[in-house]
Image: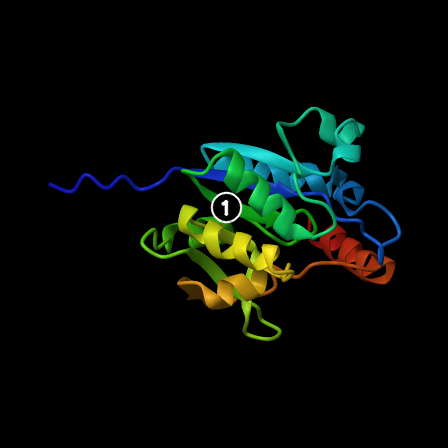
Amino acid sequence: MNTHVTPAIYGLLLSGGASRRMQRDKAQLAYAGQPQLLRAWHLLEAVTERAFLSVRAEQRDDPLRAGLPQLVDRYEAIGPAAGILTAQEAYPDVAWLVIACDLPLLDQATLQTLLDARDASGDATAFNSRFDGLPEPLCALWEPSSHGLLKQRVGGGSYCPRKALILSRTKLLPAPGDALDNINTPEEFEQMHQQIETTS
């Protein structure tokens, strides 16, 4: 009799970035009348058992974030790895569907594709980037077993979650078209805004 229980899946929306190139909080950028953060939140909430917003301590009371369940980073100045590690340490027995809040073309079908392809016997399931073919860590499913290597690498001064996926037992899926294209500059936002407004 197989008593192995597949870990539940919780959602983590990363919203703690400093948005330096954008020069404003990317979570507040609106597409089709809705802040990007809330749009991403609804996607995540729809496909996971529970979902949390990853924030830095100083973002907790921000009006856009204050009403959502939060996990406050326990690590400082290490980028997205802070949110992932914080979530894993708060709920070590679950897998985390991690998404960034600056993916305006992400849709529920893409997240469902990732979940349907899950290999719970490995460390992670992720898409390849359509730009460089490397794993996309900020729309990925991180199993509980991925924590050890990520923690070890951060402890050694390497904060790149993508490198952790490369070194882990990661099931890789083909890039989902442009669904994982992110925006980092005011110019990119303007282009994306026009693209979404004309198609919505």
Question: x and y percent of residue 170 in the render?
Answer: 42, 62
Question: x and y percent of residue 121 in the render?
Answer: 31, 54
| Residue 35 seen in this snapshot | yes
Q: Is residue 28 above or below residue 151?
A: above
Q: Nearer the viewer, residue 167 or 64?
A: 167
**Residue extending furthest right?**
23
Q: Quadrant of the N terminus?
A: top left
| Residue 176 seen in this snapshot | no
Q: Amino acid at mark 1?
A: Leu
Q: Nearer the viewer, residue 101 or 143?
A: 143
Check disc 1 and report its element: helix, strand or loop.
strand
* Residue located 40% across and 63% down the image: 169
**Residue extending furthest bottom?**
132
Identify residue for label 1: 97
Question: x and y percent of residue 30 in the render?
Answer: 78, 43
Quadrant in the rendering for residue 133: bottom right
Relative to 54, 59 lies left or right = right
* Residue located 72% across and 43% down the image: 16
